[in-house]
Image (cartoon, grey):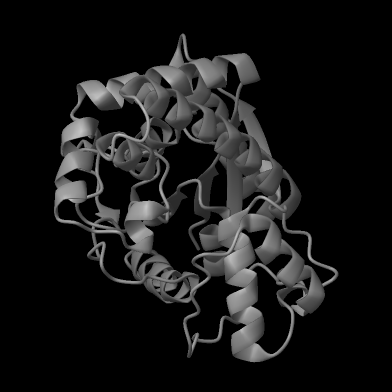
Amino acid sequence: MKKVIVICGPTAVGKTKLSIELAKEFDGEIINADSTQIFRELDIGTAKVTEEEKEGIVHHLLDICSPLEDYTVYDYQKDCRYWIEDILKRGKTPILVGGTGLYIKAALYDYEFEEEKNQYSFEGKRDEELYQELLEKDPSTAIHPHNRKRIERALCYYYNHGKPMSTKKNAHLLYDAIFIGLTTNREILYERINKRVYKMLEDGLLEEAKRLYDLPIRSKAIMTPICYKELFDYFDAKISLEDAIELIQKRSRHYAKRQYTWFRNQLPMTWVEVDFQKFSNTVLEVKKKIEESKNING
């Protein structure tokens, strides 16, 4: 049986590049594990892999939804498991790649997600209000007070099922999988994040955001990723373009920090330091870790 390879890590750390090399080496197909890249029309702002970068490697769960659709973790769990099973049946290696930890955990562990019957809106409520509301329903919650997205998800879960999300039992891994986490010095990562924002602007981020702004679309898919809402404020003349760029960089750095924390606490990671000067060294190190895990597990 082939092993499922999972490549995790913060934004801008090199996950896409590594995944392509591993797919070549292990006869793999890549499954997107980034919640923002599920949606069509969100390309530059979500750092979606380009056709050129794919190098002919098959990718799944990219561009499968309109930004007007509501795609849940429950939906991802079903779709990702379908592709894992399909790829394994064809004798190939499934490679999950992305920074959305909850998607990865939902797909690979025996999490029982019940379909949400009702959707709840929390517009008009401040983060502090929502967090206090969550504490009343789930005093044992480990969700950070400023992680609004997860707070809203936990409240939706409570109102749909009548019980706190923290009461869920610990899940068990369903697949033979290895979790590779890419890491680097914080200063290096933050510099890469800052530079990548400028590269996105060079590639047409402003035009992409303006096209969405003019439609207009204000769905969860559009307003969740870091970059579009900041540029919408610029288009509304609420902030300068310089301030919008700085805000995107700042929020991206904070997001990277949260990603590190989540992966370290939630998944059995094997961490690899990225060699950006000679990326082939990183690829060799990861291949070695994967081969070692195969030998250990027989």
Relative to 29, residue 116 above or below: below
Is the residue 264 above or below the residue 84 in the image?
Answer: above
Q: Quadrant of the C terminus?
A: bottom right
Residue in the picture at 60% in, 47% down: 179
Residue 12 appears in the picture as rendered: no
Q: Residue 180 appears at what percent x and percent y?
A: 58, 41
The quarter of the displayed image where residue 201 is located: top left
Please indicate whether residue 109 sits to the left or right of residue 287 in the image.
right
Callout count: 0
Residue 64, image x and y in percent? 24, 64
Compared to 232, does 91 lie above or below?
below
Q: Position of residue 140 (x, y in %)?
A: 85, 68
Taking depth in this image into account, of 240 and 256 the one nearest to the observer is 240
Quarter assignment of residue 248: top left
Residue in front for this viewpoint, 276 or 35? 35
Percent across and percent down for residue 246 are 45, 23
Question: Is residue 60 something that shows in the picture?
Answer: yes
- In depth, the one of 101 and 235 nearer the eye is 235
Q: Nearer the viewer, residue 116 or 92?
A: 116
Judged from this view, the residue extending furthest toward the top is 277
At x 49% / y 86%, what residue is drawn? 115
Name the side, left or right, on which 237 lies relative to 128.
left
The quadrant in which residue 260 appears is: top right
Q: Is residue 217 above or below residue 206?
A: below
Query: What residue is rendered at 45% in x and 11% in y?
Result: 278
> For this view, does 126 lie left or right of residue 243?
right
Give the residue drawn at x 38%, y 29%: 244
